[in-house]
Amino acid sequence: MTRTLRVGSPKLFSKIWRSFVLKQVGSRFHFRRVVPEALRPILGKSEIWISLGTAGKVEARRRAAELHGQTSDLFRGLRSVSRSKPPSANDSADFMTKHGFKTKDDVYRALLKKYQDMLATQETIRKNDVSSAEMAGQIKYYKSVMQHAHDVRALSAGIEKVIAVALDSQNHMTAMTRKLIEAANINSAEKKVLENEIKRLHETLLSTFTKALDGRSTTTETSAPATNETDTKPKKGVATPKTRPAILLTGALNRFLNSKPTKSLETQRDTSRTVALFIEAFGDLSIRNIDGKVAGDFRDVLFSLPASHGKTKNLSLQEEIERAASQDVSTLSAKTVKNHFMRLSSLWNDLLRRDMVEKNPWGNWDFNLTKKTSRRAWTAEEMDKLLQTPWPLCSIPADTFQGITMVAAYSGMRLGEICNLRNEDIQTIDGVLCFRICAHPEDSWSPKTEAGERLVPIHSALLDWGILNFQKTGEKYLFSELKNSQDGNRGADFSRAFSRYKTMMELPPAITFHGFRHTVSTLLRNQNSDIRELWIDALLGHEASHKSQGATTYLSGIEMQNLKRTVEAIQYPALNFPPLG
């Protein structure tokens, strides 16, 4: 007798649970399910591996159960048209006619398209959940700030009333004392001494009240970020010390960093993120109140945050710290913490030059970077493994992955430079087809350094492979399939997908996509020809390593033919993806 498992019963859940695997990579859980052998030729893979986008096991199980149902539907659909269990000829013909399919390959492609749509829907749902949680957190934070500002204003009003009453009483007592002096029978010398003493006491009292008002203004300014700075005018006849107006951290950032044209947009964006993280932890403090103790406290906060902080913003800073401690998840690396401190230190150096602060509290900290992993060039064996491992099914098409990888390998360009290439950036200069790498202020993107703006001749291997086929009429970017992330980074999705791909290939941590740049630099500097260091630096967008007077003063440019020779010196024994159609 066939036994029926009730929906929601422990036995049914156990049966479903055994058919897939939850795999934790870093702090995230992934869904892994083996593809039945009969369906592997159709899907082109032996297992399905999808990130669940969460570090919580309970939520991961819920999402995995949903994916299990969807993949089961996919497998049933594929089996209905699988060659291993073919339906009758009439059934297949009727099915294909009904749905407008001409060949069985069309049916397979339609099913794969449905699978891709399913993944896209899951990603959309995840992003909507993250966005909703982020908005709710911001609303809660702003309500708290407004309430705090209201309380501070009420306290300030009470202090002002007390000071006003005290000043009025003091003035009244001064007037009465003067009348008594006039009425008393004393000589002029004694009268002069008494008047000077009254004046001294009067000025002392006024000075005390003025300092109290200044202290109240500073407290209001640091406690309520939305309150504008106000200048307290000194009382007439009262000698008050000269003090500079208090500058908030956000004001310092806007004035001394974002207004500097020499800073790249990437540097400005990263520094702004660091300042935002500091404000989230301590508020928008006056720069005069940020000392070594505050810097040390910020260091402790950073080392307590989970490594995934910033990727999902549904938890407050304190909740993130408590989660990292209770669940024993990995925290921010020493390198990341050091980068935050270096950005703030650079900002404080600007303030020091303008005498806005007395010292830089962000320098001379120990971050213990002994476990740093150095990135290196790809070996021939690793590149061969890259060619033999299929690109996983994700939002980045396989031909886009191949195109970006080929450009990196045959030019040494950075990932951000490749992803932001526009169709208009492909130009013919002195008879040579080139990539023009330049700033696009309208999209808030610029090369990493001033030397990053350059011309890179297109390697003949790229042209033979078909790189120009990516140029599509009506599209702005060369790799039009890439999408901007929330902060406008066009390479973010590709970088995450490549990181997962590298994990699938079981490559060491020292190998990254940036390693192609190391590979090109190594190949060019080890080749047996007369390729000059200046040409290599110009091709890669480095500041010239050769600092002679002739190179720095009298060199006005490098001929395009020399750059073309440099590019063509990049040769690989067997790096070649199948040509584009």
Image (cartoon, rainbow, N blue to C red):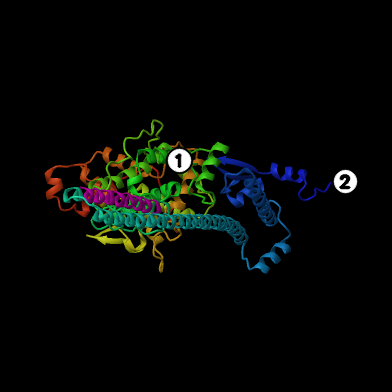
Name, please, the residue furthest toward the top.
370
Is label 1 in contact with label 2 (beta carbons under 8 Å)? no
Q: Nearer the viewer, residue 97 or 273?
A: 273
- The residue carrying pointer 1 sits among few (fewer than 14), some (14 to 19) or many (20 or more) residues within 10 Å by Cα, namely some
Element under disc 1: helix
Residue 342 image-quadrant placement: top left
Residue occupying the point 54% across, 37% down: 325
Does residue 465 belong to the magenta stretch? no
Residue corresponding to mark 1 = 301
Residue corresponding to mark 2 = 1
Name which residue type carries label 2: Met
Q: Is residue 198 left or right of residue 87?
A: left
> Going from the N terminus, do you reach mark 1 or mark 2 first?
2
User: Where does the image place residue 340, in percent across and percent down from the top left?
Assistant: 38, 43
Most frequent secondary structure within the magenta stretch: helix
Name which residue type carries label 1: Val
